[in-house]
Amino acid sequence: MRNICVCATSSGLTTVGEIDRHLSATTDESVMSFWEGNSKNAEQFPRLYWVHEKHHCIPATSAAMGRVFSAAGYIVNARRSSLSDSLIEDMLLAKCNADLLP
């Protein structure tokens, strides 16, 4: 995640601050056991828990995947054929998660 949101919240904490606290608190346990094994972690990092729930679920339909492929089609075209894989991935991630950006 790269600077998702730097705005202050009602509690005075920022998303970047929450990410920093999470990175300093994490151990070698798996992602799933970190979130599912301890509900206190979900309370300490509410925004990151929301992202975890959104991205570690099985979609009920393939419509979301169709939207991702459609977005990728708009990003990668004949004029942009020389973009690197990582840049395409970053652009697609930003486009599909625009609701998380400030």
Image (cartoon, rainbow, N blue to C red):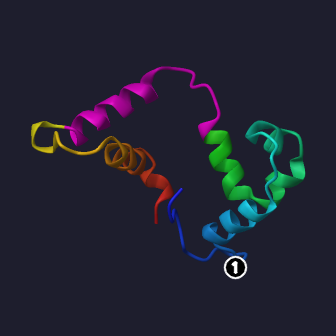
Lateral position of residue 9 relative to residue 86, left or right: right
SS of the residue at dot 1?
loop
Q: Residue 78: which quarter of the image?
A: top left
Residue at 74% over, 67% down:
21
Task: Tell whether 37 sits left or right of 19.
Answer: right
Question: Which residue is rendered at x = 51% and y = 65% of the image?
Answer: 3
Looking at the image, residue 63 lies above or below residue 26: above
- The quarter holding residue 36 reads top right
Amino acid type, mark 1: Gly
* Residue receiving disc 1: 12
Give the residue drawn at x 24%, y 42%. Answer: 75
Give the extent of the magenta segment.
Answer: 55-76
Count every numbered label the image shows and give the total: 1
- For the N terminus, give its image quadrant: bottom right
- The answer to whether 85 is drawn above or below residue 16 in the figure is above
- The spot of residue 81 in percent (x, y) is 16, 39
Overall secondary structure of the magenta section: helix
- Residue 73: within the magenta? yes
- Name the foreground residue: 9 vs 45: 45
